[in-house]
């Protein structure tokens, strides 16, 4: 494979990482790689223990490949992700089995490659992060269910396992929480044993802001909802800026770590795009900072039976106007909700609605004409939802179907990929690619001040500077150019000790992952190879050296955030049985 133009930058970054770690850190992190050894095994294959050496040999023979296999690891330009990718690359190349190069790409190019229709045939090993939520289904369905092969959703390597499919389906059709927990434990272990990917780290959501500039900020544990704290009356939170803020009076200046790729909710497949519009679009429900479902555009929900729900919508909810599309805005009705949900059919975000409305089987290459469930508009403010089968996480996920005006249909005047138009507390204001994204307060937002949040948005303008380098984001924060940013992991401790800054954090809903090209013509078609590489990943070392001790080594897919469905003991058992780093033995 040809090396990407950014290979020199990769090498430079790797040298900086090793210099920053120091000799002791490098040896501890890389274990038996060329950066250091521990004397395990017979000295062959880079110091691998005998059983691991044999497992790799058997796997290569089973897959029909000679050694070393020349391959590629791909990642985006996120510096921490590049660093742990470099560590894994070094471990693999220190054996006799691999000759791996590392290439990094600009975010939109990277996402386009990873989620492409032919991604299953891509021979690259993929470094990626997954942001999920409070319910266990969000961690495994889109990545591992055979219905979610790209481009339908995010099963990148087209992993297929009938037993796992059945467990995932059983998990959503079972309402008893203890029974569900048992199902998801079985599903997780089956996934870890099959190893279509390696789980690397459960992260933390961290925000740093200038103490004299921002008040009332709370960190949301789901990355896509990072900026709910600006103003989310349904969750009982809002923030304010003071006279010391970086922007004009009433303006918050924050940051994005990547450019905005798409503003149409049915096509948003990256976290930054979701963050850019989570104050613009709203769903009928949301999940607050304590993990409790709350009403948003719905005023009430009646569960008629295990599969039937009736929503009563808020009256007087207004859509944002648009000068570009000559749209004056109007009141939202149940017809808009029905339209919005049906609009997800056949898109890359189909699962956001299809998981509970059901997508019928169709011949390969064809899309369904309708969902299996039914949506009945009874009047302007009443919508009846009949699911095809029981869906336990319904109240946690129904809000993923974001509501837009009917005028965004194929024959309508609105193009949401050009301008996002929703009902949220902020409306689109300005966008300069690779530079900034700006929202302004929507004066006709539905909230009337009846709760603990003020009726009018204290922050009038939210400006997000697009700064891809974490060190540059920190410099902008320290220099007073921005009010709030995601700091580099290695700078968190220092910022916490300085009174000028406040750091808030929560355990994150998601994980970092290393995806194997198991359906392409590679050695990773062999389960033995995948399980062996699991043991070449020094997760504790990565957490310590790359993330400055922030986060937790991940050996299974469900984050501790969904604590009713996993545990520290279960995660550690998965590590001990399937993924324990060979250098720790």
Image: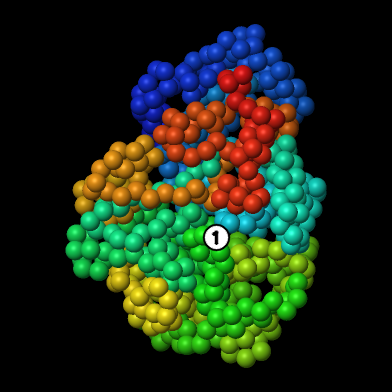
> Residue 406's x, y, as percent?
54, 82
Q: Which residue, given by chain and number where applicable, does mark 1 sit on? A: 291
Residue 41, by quadrant, is: top right
Residue 532 in sight:
yes
* Residue 197 percent across, percent down from the top left: 64, 39
| Identity of the residue furthest to the top in this view | 42
In this view, 144 is above or below 535: below
Q: Report the front residue among 29 and 233.
A: 233
Q: Is residue 334 visible?
A: no
The answer to whether residue 583 is above or below residue 43 is below
382, 263: nearer the viewer: 382
Q: Residue at x 37, y 67 (%)?
A: 238
The one of 248 and 178 positioned closer to us in this rendering:
178
Residue 552 or residue 40, whichever sits in front? 552
Question: To which quarter of the image does residue 215 belong?
Answer: bottom left
Q: Residue furthest left?
A: 243
Asked which quadrant contains residue 364, the reply is bottom right
Query: Residue 159's spot in the image, x, y percent?
Result: 71, 45
Find residue 289 and report its horizontal and vertical position in percent. Answer: 49, 60
Q: Residues within 10 Å of mark 1 (few under 14, many from 20)?
A: some
Please tell me whether mark 1 sits on a helix, a strand or a loop: loop
Q: Is residue 573 above or below residue 318?
A: above
Give left or right: position of 452 versus 264.
left
Q: Is residue 166 left or right of residue 272?
A: right
Residue at x 61%, y 19% (from the top left corner): 585
What residue appears at the point 46 percent right and 75 percent down from the top-left corner? 422
Q: Residue at x 68, y 20 (%)?
A: 52
């Amino acid at each position: 494979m040809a090396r990407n133009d950014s290979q020199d930058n990769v090498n430079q970054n790797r040298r900086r990482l090793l210099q920053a770690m120091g000799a002791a850190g490098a040896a501890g992190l890389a274990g038996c790689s060329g950066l250091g050894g521990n004397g395990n095994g017979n000295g062959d294959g880079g110091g691998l223990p005998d059983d691991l050496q044999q497992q790799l040999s058997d796997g290569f023979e089973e897959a029909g490949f000679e050694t070393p296999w020349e391959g590629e690891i791909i990642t985006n330009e996120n510096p921490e992700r590049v660093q742990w990718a470099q560590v894994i690359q070094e471990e693999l190349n220190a054996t006799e089995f691999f000759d791996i190069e590392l290439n990094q790409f600009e975010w939109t190019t990277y996402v386009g490659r990873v989620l492409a229709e032919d991604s299953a045939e891509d021979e690259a090993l993929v470094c990626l992060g997954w942001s999920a939520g409070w319910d266990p289904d969000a961690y495994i369905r889109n990545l591992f269910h055979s219905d979610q092969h790209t481009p339908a959703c995010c099963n990148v390597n087209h992993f297929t396992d009938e037993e796992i499919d059945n467990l995932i389906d059983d998990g959503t059709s079972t309402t008893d929480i203890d029974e569900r927990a048992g199902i998801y434990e079985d599903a997780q272990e089956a996934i870890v044993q099959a190893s279509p990917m390696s789980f690397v780290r459960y992260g933390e959501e961290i925000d740093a802001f200038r103490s004299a500039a921002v008040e009332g900020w709370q960190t949301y544990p789901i990355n896509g909802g990072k900026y709910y704290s600006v103003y989310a009356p349904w969750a009982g939170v809002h923030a304010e800026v003071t006279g010391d803020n970086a922007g004009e009076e009433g303006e918050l200046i924050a940051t994005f770590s990547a450019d905005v790729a798409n503003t149409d909710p049915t096509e948003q497949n990256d976290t930054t795009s979701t963050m850019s519009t989570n104050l613009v679009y709203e769903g009928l429900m949301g999940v607050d900072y304590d993990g409790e479902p709350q009403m948003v555009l719905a005023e009430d929900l009646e569960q008629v039976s295990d599969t039937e729900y009736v929503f009563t919508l808020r009256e007087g909810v207004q859509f944002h106007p648009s000068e570009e599309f000559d749209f004056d805005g109007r009141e939202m009705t149940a017809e808009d909700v029905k339209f919005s949900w049906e609009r997800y059919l056949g898109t890359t975000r189909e699962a956001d609605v299809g998981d509970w409305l059901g997508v019928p089987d169709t011949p390969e290459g064809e899309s369904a004409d309708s969902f299996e469930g039914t949506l009945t508009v009874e009047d302007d403010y009443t919508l009846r939802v009949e699911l095809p089968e029981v869906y336990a996480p319904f109240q946690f996920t129904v809000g993923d179907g974001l509501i837009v005006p009917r005028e965004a249909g194929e024959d309508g005047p609105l193009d949401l990929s050009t301008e996002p138009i929703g009902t949220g507390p902020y409306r689109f204001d300005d966008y300069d690619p690779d530079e900034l994204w700006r929202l302004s307060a929507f004066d006709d937002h539905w909230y009337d001040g009846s709760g603990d949040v003020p009726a009018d948005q204290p922050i009038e303008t939210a400006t997000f500077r697009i700064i891809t380098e974490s060190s540059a984001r920190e410099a902008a924060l320290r220099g007073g150019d921005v009010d709030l940013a995601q700091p580099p992991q290695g700078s968190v401790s220092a910022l916490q000790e300085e009174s000028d800054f406040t750091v808030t954090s929560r355990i994150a809903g998601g994980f970092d992952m290393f995806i194997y090209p198991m359906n392409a013509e590679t050695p990773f078609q062999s389960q033995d190879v995948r399980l062996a590489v699991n043991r070449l990943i020094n997760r504790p070392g990565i957490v310590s050296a790359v993330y400055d001790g922030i986060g937790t080594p991940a050996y299974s897919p469900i984050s501790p955030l969904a604590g009713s469905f996993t545990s520290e003991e279960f995660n550690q058992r998965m590590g001990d049985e399937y993924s324990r780093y060979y250098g720790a033995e």
